[in-house]
C-alpha cells in the first residue's frame, strides 16, 4: 500500500512539473506573439488581397494553401535555423532582429509612399494582379503570398527567439517556437478566413426575411470596405512603430544608446507632465518617436531595397526556397 501511495505521489509531482512547464511555454509564447504584433497585423492585413477576384468557393481553399505554406516556412525552415542560431551564434540574434525591424520600417514606409502617390506598387499588391488561367493564377497568388509570409514569419520567429531566456533548454526553446508558429498561423489565417467570408455572410443575412438579420447583413456589407482600409492603416502604423522600436533597442544593445535614451527621457518628462495617466502618455510618446524614426529609416531604405537588395534576393534566396519546397 505504501508503495502505491509513493507511486501516486511521484505521478502527482511529475504532473505538477509538466503543468508548470506547459504554463511557462504558453506564457512565453504569448509574450513573443505580443512582441511580434507589427508583423502579425501586417500579415493579416495583406493576405486577403490574394483571394480578391476569385470565385467564393475558392477563397477558403486558397487561404488554407497559404496557411499551410506559412506553417512550412515557420516549422520546417525557420524553426531549425532559429535553434541553430541560439546554440552556435546567439550573438547574431540582435543584428538579425534589427535587420527584421529595418524590413518592417521599409515595408511600412513603402506603403505610406504608395498611398501618397510615390513609388511603384508594393510587391505583394503586384502579385494580386498576375495573369493567367484560373489554376495558374491561383498558384501564382499562393506562391506570392507564401513568399511574402516567409519574410514576416522570419521576423516573428526571430522576435520570439529573442524573448526566450538563455537559460531555457534547447527542447524548451523548440517547443516555445513551435507553439508561437502554430498559434500565430492559426490566429492570423483564421482571422483572414473570417474577413474574406464576411461579405458572403453579410449578403446571406441581408436576404433573410427576418428584419434584424437582414439589417445585420446589410451592416456587415457596408462596414467591411472601411474595416479593411482601417486594418491596412493599423497594420502599416504597427509595422513602422514596431520596426523603429526594434532597431533603436538594437542600437542601444550594441552600444549606441543615444537615440533610445533620448526618447526614454522625453517619455518620462511627458508622463510627469500628465500625472493622471503617466503610463499611457509615456507609451504614446515612445511609440510616436519610434514611429518617426521607423518612417525616416524606411524612406531611406526604399531606394536601397529597390535597386540593390531586391534584385540580389531574387537571384539567390528565391531559387533556394523553391528547391526547399520541391525537395
Image: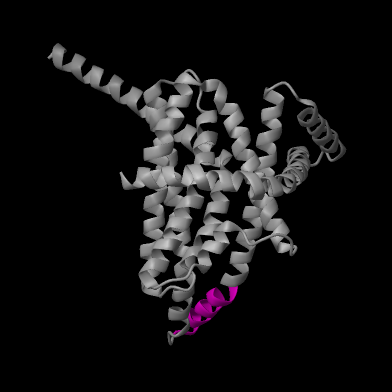
As drawn, 237 above or below 249? below
Q: Which secondary structure type mostly characterizes the magenta part of the structure?
A: helix
- The residue at the far right in this view is 273
- The residue sitting at 37% across, 57% down in the picture is 65
As drawn, 200 above or below 157? below
Nearest the eye: 320 or 124: 320
- The residue at the far bottom in this view is 209
As drawn, 89 above or below 249? above
Which quadrant of the figure contains the N terminus?
top left
Report if residue 238 is visible in the image. Answer: no
Expressed as whole percent of the image width and height from the top left, the position of residue 21 reads 38, 27
Nearest the eye: 305 or 268: 305
- The residue sitting at 70% across, 40% down in the picture is 244
* Quadrant position of residue 72: top left
Expressed as whole percent of the image width and height from the top left, the position of residue 70 reads 42, 49
Q: Is residue 28 left or right of residue 106?
A: left
Q: Is residue 36 left or right of residue 183?
A: right
- The residue sitting at 44% across, 69% down in the picture is 197
- The residue at the far left in this view is 1
* Quadrant position of residue 55: bottom left
- Indicate whether residue 196 is drawn in magenta: no
Expressed as whole percent of the image width and height from the top left, the position of residue 20 reads 39, 26
Looking at the rendering, the stretch of residues picked out in magenta corresponds to 210-223
- Indicate whether residue 221 is drawn in magenta: yes
Amino acid at each position: 500500500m505504501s508503495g502505491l501511495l509513493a507511486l501516486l505521489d511521484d505521478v502527482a509531482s511529475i504532473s505538477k512539473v509538466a503543468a508548470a512547464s506547459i504554463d511557462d511555454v504558453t506564457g512565453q509564447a504569448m509574450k513573443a506573439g505580443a512582441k511580434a504584433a507589427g508583423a502579425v497585423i501586417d500579415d493579416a492585413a495583406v493576405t486577403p488581397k490574394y483571394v480578391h477576384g476569385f470565385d467564393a468557393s475558392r477563397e477558403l481553399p486558397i487561404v488554407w494553401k497559404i496557411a499551410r505554406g506559412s506553417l512550412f516556412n515557420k516549422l520546417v525552415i525557420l524553426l531549425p535555423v532559429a535553434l541553430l542560431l541560439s546554440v552556435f551564434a546567439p550573438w547574431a540574434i540582435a543584428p538579425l532582429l534589427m535587420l527584421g525591424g529595418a524590413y518592417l520600417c521599409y515595408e511600412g514606409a513603402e506603403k505610406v509612399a504608395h498611398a501618397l502617390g510615390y513609388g511603384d506598387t508594393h510587391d505583394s499588391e503586384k502579385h494580386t494582379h498576375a495573369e493567367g488561367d484560373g489554376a495558374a493564377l491561383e498558384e501564382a497568388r499562393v506562391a506570392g503570398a507564401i513568399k511574402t509570409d516567409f519574410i514576416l514569419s522570419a521576423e516573428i520567429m526571430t522576435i520570439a527567439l529573442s524573448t526566450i531566456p538563455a537559460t531555457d533548454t534547447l527542447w524548451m526553446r523548440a517547443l516555445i517556437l513551435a507553439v508561437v508558429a502554430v498559434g500565430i498561423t492559426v490566429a492570423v489565417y483564421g482571422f483572414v478566413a473570417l474577413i474574406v467570408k464576411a461579405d458572403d455572410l453579410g449578403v446571406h443575412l441581408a436576404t433573410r426575411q427576418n428584419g434584424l438579420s437582414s439589417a445585420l447583413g446589410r451592416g456587415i456589407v457596408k462596414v467591411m470596405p472601411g474595416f479593411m482600409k482601417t486594418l491596412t492603416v493599423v497594420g502599416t502604423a504597427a509595422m513602422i512603430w514596431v520596426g523603429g522600436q526594434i532597431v533603436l533597442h538594437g542600437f542601444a544593445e550594441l552600444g549606441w544608446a543615444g537615440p533610445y535614451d533620448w526618447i526614454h527621457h522625453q517619455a518620462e518628462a511627458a508622463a510627469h507632465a500628465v500625472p493622471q495617466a503617466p503610463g499611457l502618455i509615456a507609451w504614446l510618446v515612445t511609440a510616436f518617436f519610434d514611429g518617426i524614426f521607423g518612417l525616416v529609416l524606411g524612406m531611406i531604405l526604399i531606394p536601397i531595397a529597390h535597386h540593390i537588395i531586391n534584385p540580389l534576393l531574387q537571384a539567390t534566396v528565391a531559387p533556394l526556397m523553391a528547391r526547399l519546397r520541391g525537395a
